Amino acid sequence: MLAHLPVLQVIVPLMASPLCLLLTRPRLVWLFTLIVSGLAFLISSLLLQQVMASGTIIYALGGWDAPWGIEYRIDQLNAFLLLIISALSTVVLLAAHTSIRQEIPADRHTLFYILYLLSLAGMLGIVATGDAFNVFVFLEISSLSAYALIALGKDRRALWASYQYLIMGTIGATFILIGIGLMYQMTGTLNMDDLSRRLPEVAHTRTIFTAFAFIIVGVCLKLALFPLHLWLPNAYAYAPSIVTAFFAATATKVAIYLLIRFTFSVFGLSFSFTAVPLQILFVVLGVAGIFVASTAAIYQNNVKHLFAYSSIAQIGYMMVGFSISTATGLMATLLHVFNHALMKSALFLALGAVMYRIGSVQINQFQGLGHQMPYTMAAIVVGGLSLIGVPLTVGFVSKWYLILAAIEKGWWPVAVLILLGSLLAIVYVWRIVEAAYFKPPIAGRDAIKEAPLSFLMPIWILVIANIYFGIDTRLSVGVAQAASQSLFGVSP
Amino acid sequence: MLLGLYNYWIVVVLMMVGFYIVIAHGNLIKKIVGLSIFQTSVFIFYISMAKVDGGTAPILAEGISQYSNPLPHVLILTAIVVGIATTAVGLALAVRIKEAYGSIEEEEIQKKDNEDC
């Protein structure tokens, strides 16, 4: 059983999703989904433990050895990402039953859970697999279910957002497919490990450059790197609250993983950063993304829009860490992947609770909520502080390492720009705090009750995680460090 | 040289045609059709690269020593299924958009959205 964990990680949610159809009562389906997601979390914890103790796990699917068969290859990086995805999926699901009862018509609840599990299976698959074409297949499994999930939003704009995401997402995925095809043409293999050994022989050819360009652009479309981010704000703003919380925590993170995997493991450090001016490109786009998206966030009146733009800015930080291309820089990126997942899922879940109580997340509707929904608003404040990067929250830890990495590299201006970017975060977080705490409650509106426990529990699990991992960084920093060092080929 | 690679020329032309339609057209159905053409060009690309000159289907038989590579065909079967699924989801969304907005022209939808805000 233990030997089969890598495949069980993906297979369990994948097989469980059609089984949802057999269960008739919505509450039962929810419980079932929660258990399956919890199982995935358990498996990923075991995998992480195993990887940290005894190194990379290689699993040949169906007993066919690579490079002929498909291989699942779990190293520190995958295991870390698997843990993030399955853990946050489970916590977010705790609130799902309460939330979707109000946001999605009853006859579509089962469909919601089926899509959710498919999307989860797709994301876990992208991360677990060591086969380039398999990545494309899982990417499409998770994306197609994502389009449908977003379209479940009750606003008609959700449909339009989903359509735009579908167009952009499919272009991105097809670009990745073209890139994989070009690589296959030159090397005759799809196995990532095998590719990494065969690519250097043909690295100087134009075909490989083209492949690299297609893959990078495709992945950047998926991860919503500025200026390819246009699909994201509306998709996040109009999707059901649970879907937003889930995707904000996981979807772009999976794309960041793909970027790291392709540049570091498949193409190799020397090709990715010396043959192509990737470093300068990403640092410029990353910093531009931080400023443009943070500024856009300040002017949003829909709070979900506001945090969606903030997500794009946070992706900018991850890209800056990535472009520094030192072990510390990459570690900062990985840490931010983990930390940002914690903050954004907490924030979007809290917004889900607001949506549940007042049916809107317009900022002018927040007036007086500081006293009427104290626990939910306190969660938003802590999440916001974490976004800014205040000490004792996770946001501080990742920004600290990011600035450290920039200074180590001698990129002083970048370090300063990162700090300036955080100031913009203060502005947009303050707008919410001001509305919730310092403005009188809306006249004529009945007193709003605090969100139900089924919301508060997952929200506060995440908030406490935000604080806990801001103080005790052994797990997050330890794993991120091990992962980045193994990618740089440094023995820890 | 140029003519020998005509498959790839077709791939490039189809790819650009499809991509152009996706970007330039405002009609949602036309966009999906463009996307389909774009994906199809990639299918042809994979199949073309699998062909070995003088090779046949990979079945063991007497007198045949050269085979074409069957793997890209298999990969593309998967990609075709994905392509169909994407088209189906896209068209289904277009239907729902038509019901909700009463239009499938990008500009009109955008205009109605702006009025909502």
Image (spheres, coloured by chain):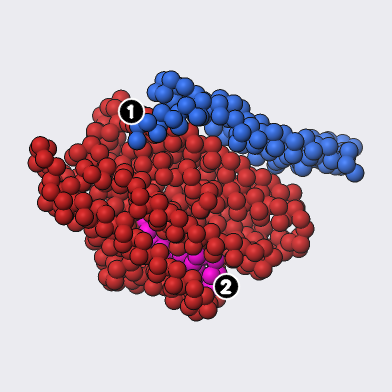
Q: Residue at x 60, y 36 (%)?
A: B23
Q: Which element is circle 2 on?
A: loop
Chain for mark 2? A
Spot occupied by residue A364 in the image (x, y as percentages of width and height) = 23, 44
Which is nearer the eye, A226 or A375? A226
Between disc 2 and disc 1, whose residue precedes?
1
The residue tagged 1 is A108
Spot occupied by residue B85 in the image (x, y as percentages of width and height) = 54, 30
Residue A483: within the magenta? Answer: no
- Numbered disc total: 2
User: What amino acid does circle 1 point to?
Assistant: Arg
For residue A479, say whether it is visible.
no
Spot occupied by residue A280 in the image (x, y as percentages of width and height) = 59, 65
Figure chain in blue: B
Q: Residue at x 52, y 44 (%)?
A: A139
The residue tagged 2 is A489
